[in-house]
Amino acid sequence: MKIGIGNDHSALELKAEIMELLKEKGHEVVDYGTNSPESCDYPVYGEKVGRAVASGEVERGILICGTGLGISLAANKVKGVRAAVCSEPFTAKMSRAHNNCNILAFGARVVGAELAKMIVETWLDTEFEGGRHQRRVDMLMDIENRNE
């Protein structure tokens, strides 16, 4: 799978570990984040990954900032994006199984590297269940389309 990853300055070390994990698992990784420790603006990177996912340039995205919140909010402003902040594996699983989320976000200041890896693995290994959940995802997309 081709996965886009984006981050701000707070997540440099964690991004490197997640990229290594993804590559070990055979995924192609496109880095849209900063590689500088200088303070930067997380919305820039959330939007970059959001646009890459929405356009099909990458299949899914992973975003990391201090909490995961700000960068996910930026990504969710892009039409077609469903980004979820997940700080443990159960929410990551449900974000895929029930919401078909195409972007995972978490906070470098909230979860450690090993927990982040568990979250990523769970998220990547979980398939969308469809069925009644598809109707609800369609409802979300209808809201988005009414707000154009």
Image (spheres, rainbow, N blue to C red):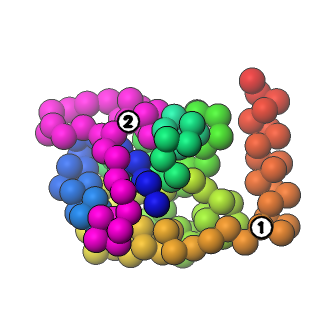
Amino acid type for the residue under numbered disc 2: Tyr
Disc 1: which residue: 130
Classify residue 28 as left or right of residue 40: right
Amino acid type for the residue under numbered disc 1: Gly
Which residue is the extreme one toward the top? Answer: 148
Q: Residue 137 lies in magenta, yes or no?
A: no
Q: Is residue 136 above or below residue 51?
A: below
Crowd around label 2: few <14 · some 14–19 · many ≥20 (10 Å): many
Q: Residue 29 lies in magenta, yes or no?
A: yes
129 or 107: nearer the viewer? 129
In the image, residue 58 lies at what x, y percent?
48, 47
Looking at the rendering, the stretch of residues picked out in magenta corresponds to 22-49
In the image, residue 11 lies at what x, y percent?
25, 50
Disc 2: which residue: 45
Classify residue 127 as left or right of residue 87: right
In the image, residue 102 lies at what x, y percent?
57, 53
Residue 11 shows up from this direction = yes
* The quarter of the displayed image where residue 145 is located: top right
Q: Residue at x 51, y 74 (%)?
A: 125
Q: Is residue 118 above or below residue 144?
A: below
Q: Assign the C terminus to one quadrant of the image.
A: top right
Classify residue 35 as left or right of residue 82: left
